[in-house]
């Protein structure tokens, strides 16, 4: 009888905990909100944002989509840089207040970590600076009333650059990355997952699985051809993971077949053009320091061009 009572109590507690977890899971759709995306060169490249916007427009043609993506190459969240870098790496905190003030987002997506480890073996000071930078980012965003989703850093693949990777006791830098820098990024990812629970999208874990599967079939294959920056296939996987976590009802196929189809898809072509125009216009309008100081006083030209493209995109969607 005692065993039966214990089993019953355990079952009830499990059900209650499961319901609580499900109820607490944040509902963070990207539609009908102003969304700001922050990140480094991978986000400035923006292909994953192109894929993301396309599939959201394709699946929800009648809903409003308002994404401003302003990734900046070389940027960190920690403020760290290396002595042999051509210039001091920009830090998102030097432009974060302005970005939040000018864009007034309801939701922020932020992807940092790749540059924060400075392509070297794990260092407690750098890791501490990364943690402090992320915590400061969370406080700043949430203080505005906006929601935040953290994207983990994508994987590092040393295979394509074997001739210039650095071993344990060799000098390490972006030019000669630490051979196990992928392990450093995994530690950063694990910390993010433990910190922010169900408001983290684990790009590192998902892309690592895809990379392992690819290399199992063909050992010299990769979608991170310079060890750091995902190519078009890698960006597709990034978008696919984001969609899977936020819009699980959206189902998309394999990258090779999908990317080939999108090359002639007018909705994708125009959405991508719109994203590039909007990203550049708002990046410069918010302003940044990357060796030189860049700032534009004009965002109205960007807004006008985007509105013109919106009309064309809406026309295409109405006929699909």
Image (spheres, rainbow, N blue to C red):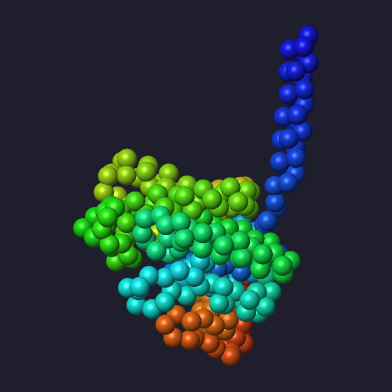
> Which residue of the protein is positioned furthest toward the bottom in this rendering?
297
Query: Which of the 4 quarters of the picture holds residue 214?
Result: top left
Q: x, y percentage for residue 218?
A: 28, 44
> Which residue of the protein is positioned furthest toward the top in this rendering?
1
Q: Residue at x 53, y 87 (%)?
A: 295
Q: Residue at x 62, y 87 (%)?
A: 300
Of 202 and 220, the residue lying toward us: 202
Q: x, y percentage for residue 126?
A: 46, 61
Observer able to see residue 309: no
In the image, residue 22 above or below residue 120: above
Quadrant of the image for the C terminus? bottom right
Quadrant of the image for the N terminus? top right
Q: x, y percentage for residue 192?
A: 55, 52
Q: Residue at x 77, y 33 (%)?
A: 16
Q: Is residue 180 left or right of residue 94?
A: left
In the image, residue 254 above or below residue 11: below
Of 301 and 149, the residue lying toward us: 149
Q: Residue at x 49, y 70 (%)?
A: 79
Observer able to see residue 89: yes
Q: Is residue 18 left or right of residue 192?
A: right
Q: x, y percentage for residue 94?
A: 55, 77
Of 250 and 4, the residue lying toward us: 4
In the image, residue 289 above or below residue 227: below
């Amino acid at each position: 009888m005692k065993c039966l009572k214990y089993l019953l109590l355990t079952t009830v507690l499990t059900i209650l905990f499961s319901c609580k977890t499900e109820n607490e899971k944040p509902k963070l759709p990207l539609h009908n909100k102003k969304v700001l995306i922050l990140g480094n060169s991978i986000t400035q490249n923006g292909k994953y944002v192109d894929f993301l916007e396309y599939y959201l427009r394709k699946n929800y043609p009648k809903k409003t989509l308002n994404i401003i993506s302003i990734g900046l190459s070389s940027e960190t969240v920690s403020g760290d840089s290396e002595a042999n870098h051509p210039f001091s790496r920009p830090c998102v905190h030097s432009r974060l207040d302005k970005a939040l003030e000018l864009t007034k987002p309801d939701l922020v997506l932020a992807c940092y970590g790749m540059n924060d480890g400075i392509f070297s073996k794990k260092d407690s000071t750098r890791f501490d600076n990364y943690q402090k930078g992320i915590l400061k980012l969370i406080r700043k965003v949430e203080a505005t009333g906006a929601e935040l989703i953290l994207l983990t850093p994508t994987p590092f693949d040393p295979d394509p650059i074997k001739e210039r990777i650095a071993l344990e006791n060799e000098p390490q830098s972006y030019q000669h990355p630490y051979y196990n820098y992928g392990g450093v990024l995994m530690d950063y990812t694990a910390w993010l997952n433990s910190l922010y629970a169900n408001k983290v999208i684990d790009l590192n874990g998902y892309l690592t699985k895809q990379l392992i599967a690819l290399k199992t079939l063909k050992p010299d294959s990769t979608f991170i051809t310079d060890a750091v920056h995902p190519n078009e296939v890698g960006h597709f996987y990034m978008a696919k993971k984001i969609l899977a976590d936020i819009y699980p009802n959206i189902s998309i196929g394999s990258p090779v077949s999908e990317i080939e189809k999108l090359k002639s898809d007018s909705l994708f072509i125009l959405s991508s053009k719109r994203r590039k125009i909007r990203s550049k216009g708002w990046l410069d309008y918010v302003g940044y320091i990357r060796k030189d100081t860049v700032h534009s006083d004009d965002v109205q030209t960007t807004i006008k061009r985007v509105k013109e493209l919106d009309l064309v995109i809406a026309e295409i969607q109405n006929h699909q």
